[in-house]
């Protein structure tokens, strides 16, 4: 009961997030449409899809999910299944409330491995989860750096398989121009295809381009992984705040 209550109050996917999603639904189309177009390019190799922390599936579409015969959703939030069912029409979905990543408030270094062993006949999608880890559990900067160093070793191995994909926060800020500066700094190969005009058009006010941005500690997670398909997205999450999202999946050589 305590676990469910904590999940309900979570800043990352609890009641406040559900309320925000209802009020900002139309504004999110500029993020969810290109995200799902990219997800549709992830090859379907299994009949089952495991969604890790999907909340109520606000960023997903029926077109993408219906490629799979069965959906397994791992999320402790007790409200999410009800809203998910209302929003999306997949006929075969199973909800799992188990928290694979934090056991007795301790980080589980083998979480991704445990998920793949529990559901061996599936593909796996981390639904904007990795960048929310700093929000889910309060930790010092050094603790977060150590945790993400451990996580980097996990994903370097896990994402060498075409069965895994993720989209996650890189940075967030009040000013999208600040995020574009970070794209040019950390992702020079992707910045040319990233639409600078989109940022400028959606800037809520004239501010310094290098204004403060929140680091979600995921920038280096996939730097050592080879053969990844990477894509960047801008999420206008509410009126005066933006998230820079990275999508990744392993792309097999033809």
Image (cartoon, rainbow, N blue to C red):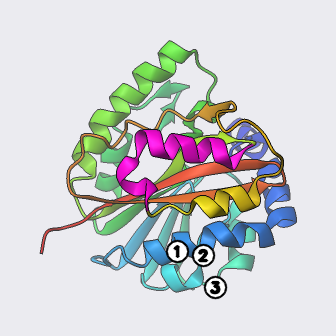
Quarter of the figure that contains the C terminus: bottom left
When the figure is inspected, residue 122 is found, relative to residue 199, above or below; the finding is below
- Mark with earlier residue (3, 2): 2
Spatial CA span between label 1 and label 3: 16 Å
Residue that mark 3 sits on: 89
Principal secondary structure, stretch drawn in magenta: helix
Residue at image coords 37%, 34%: 151
Secondary structure, mark 1, is: helix
Residue at image coords 62%, 70%: 32
For residue 75, side relative to residue 161 (left or right):
right
Residues 57 and 122: in front is 57
Residues 2 and 200: in front is 200
* For the residues bearing labels 3 and 2, Cβ distance under 8 angstroms: no
Residue that mark 1 sits on: 36
Spatial CA span between label 3 and label 2: 18 Å
Residue 228 position within the rendered picture, expressed as x and y whole percent measured from the top left: 28, 57
* For the residues bearing labels 1 and 2, Cβ distance under 8 angstroms: yes
- Which residue is farthest left? 254
Residue stretch rendered in magenta on the structure:
175-192
Q: Label for residue 207?
A: none
- Badge 3 local density, few (<14 within 10 Å), some, or many (20+)? some
- Badge 2 local density, few (<14 within 10 Å), some, or many (20+)? some
* For the residues bearing labels 1 and 3, Cβ distance under 8 angstroms: no
Residue that mark 2 sits on: 33
Secondary structure, mark 3, is: loop
Examine the rendering and report whether any part of residue 112 can be seen.
yes
Spatial CA span between label 1 and label 2: 5 Å
Quarter of the figure that contains the N terminus: top right
When the figure is inspected, residue 191 is found, relative to residue 73, above or below; the finding is above
Does the magenta run of residues contain 177?
A: yes
Examine the rendering and report whether any part of residue 170 can be seen.
no
Question: Image quadrant of residue 91?
Answer: bottom right
């Amino acid at each position: 009961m305590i676990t469910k209550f904590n999940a309900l109050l979570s800043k990352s996917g609890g009641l406040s997030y559900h309320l925000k999603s209802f009020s900002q639904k139309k504004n999110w189309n500029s993020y969810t449409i290109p995200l799902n177009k990219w997800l549709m390019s992830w090859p379907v190799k299994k009949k089952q899809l495991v969604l890790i922390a999907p909340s109520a599936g606000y960023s997903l579409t029926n077109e993408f999910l219906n490629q799979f015969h069965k959906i397994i959703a791992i999320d402790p939030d007790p409200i999410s299944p009800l809203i998910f069912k209302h929003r999306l029409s997949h006929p075969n979905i199973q909800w799992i409330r188990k928290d694979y990543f934090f056991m007795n408030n301790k980080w589980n270094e083998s979480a991704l491995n445990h998920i793949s062993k529990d559901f061996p006949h599936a593909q796996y999608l981390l639904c904007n989860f990795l960048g929310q880890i700093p929000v889910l559990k309060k930790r010092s900067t050094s603790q977060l750096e150590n945790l993400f160093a451990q996580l980097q070793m996990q994903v370097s191995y896990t994402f060498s398989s075409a069965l895994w994909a993720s989209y996650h926060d890189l940075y967030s800020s009040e000013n999208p121009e600040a995020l574009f500066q970070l794209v040019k700094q950390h992702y020079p190969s992707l910045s040319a295809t990233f639409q600078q005009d989109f940022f400028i058009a959606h800037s809520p006010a004239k501010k310094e381009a290098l204004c403060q941005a929140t680091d979600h500690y995921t920038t280096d997670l996939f730097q050592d992984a080879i053969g990844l398909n990477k894509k960047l997205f801008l999420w206008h999450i509410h009126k005066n705040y933006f998230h820079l999202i990275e999508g990744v999946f392993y792309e097999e050589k033809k």
